[in-house]
Image (cartoon, rainbow, N blue to C red):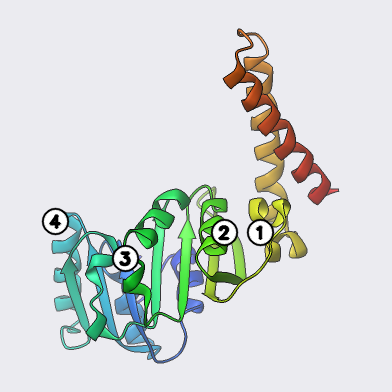
Amino acid sequence: MNAQKLSKRLQTVAAYVPQNAVVADIGSDHAYLPCYLVHQGIVQKAIAGEVVKGPYESACKEVRTEQLQDKITVRLADGMEAVEHEDGVTAVTIAGMGGPLIASILNKDLTRLQTVERLILQPNIHAMAIRVWAKQNGWKVIDEAILKEDRKIYEVLVLEHGTEDLTEAELLVGPYLMREKNDVFVEKWTGEVKQWQQILASIAEVEQTEAIQEKQKELHAKIAIVKDVLA
């Protein structure tokens, strides 16, 4: 993977960035995504934010190598602190983290989202946390994708301003994904059900405390939801 050719996962993220957006890529690592977006003529201006010094230096080096210093600003900052109001950022991409971490990054300073029109988020796990965050903060899911790369399954969620009333099933597995129900979706959730059933079997042998009983109830509810969706 490089600035000219992204992984399938990041190509999917890039496909949802609107033409001529001002994009901030949070947790940019080598800044491959913003470099690719500029090279493809999708954006003219981008911010690459990175909280760790090593990846920040890698991003700086990549931007210099690609000769894009006039179009991409690299900032060493914690999450959305990489975004300044005067940047006029209209799209934010966050890829390769857990859903709860992505939600906490967005939640830390909601004022930094004032000019943002679209969020393109790629959680590695627990995408539900992002859907819950969206519902609570005036954002709605306008599209989703699920894909498999190098034996790992990834989801991409696209959010814009608005409200929606998602069901428990839609929050858990995704409103668009459960409608399409492609092979990767079926594989993911079939695997999740098996894992939950294994957990239930293992905790059936331990002392039935209130916490254990609550966990059993939660897992039984999730299994029922997913089995209903997959039926």
Q: Would you name the residue on which mark 2 appears?
A: 131
Residue depth check, mark 1 versus mark 4: number of the one nearer the observer = 1
Q: Earlier in the sequence, mark 2 or mark 3?
A: 3
The answer to whether residue 138 is left or right of residue 32 is: right
User: In whole angstroms, how far apart are the C-alphas of marks 1 and 2?
Assistant: 8 Å
**How busy is the neighbourhood of tag 3: few (under 14 within 10 Å), some, or many (20 plus)?**
many
Looking at the rendered structure, the kind of residue marked 4 is: Lys
Q: Residue at x 29, y 78 (%)?
A: 35
User: In whole angstroms, how far apart are the C-alphas of marks 2 and 3?
Assistant: 19 Å
Residue 174: which numbered mark, if any? 1
Vertical placement of residue 148 versus 30, above or below: above
Q: Would you name the residue on which mark 4 appears?
A: 53
Identify the image quadrant of residue 95: bottom left
| Labels 1 and 2 touching (C-beta < 8 A) | yes
| Labels 4 and 3 touching (C-beta < 8 A) | no
Q: Earlier in the sequence, mark 4 or mark 3?
A: 3
Q: Would you name the residue on which mark 3 appears?
A: 26
User: In whole angstroms, how far apart are the C-alphas of marks 3 and 1?
Assistant: 23 Å
Q: Secondary structure at mark 2?
A: helix
Vertical placement of residue 152 versus 109, above or below: above
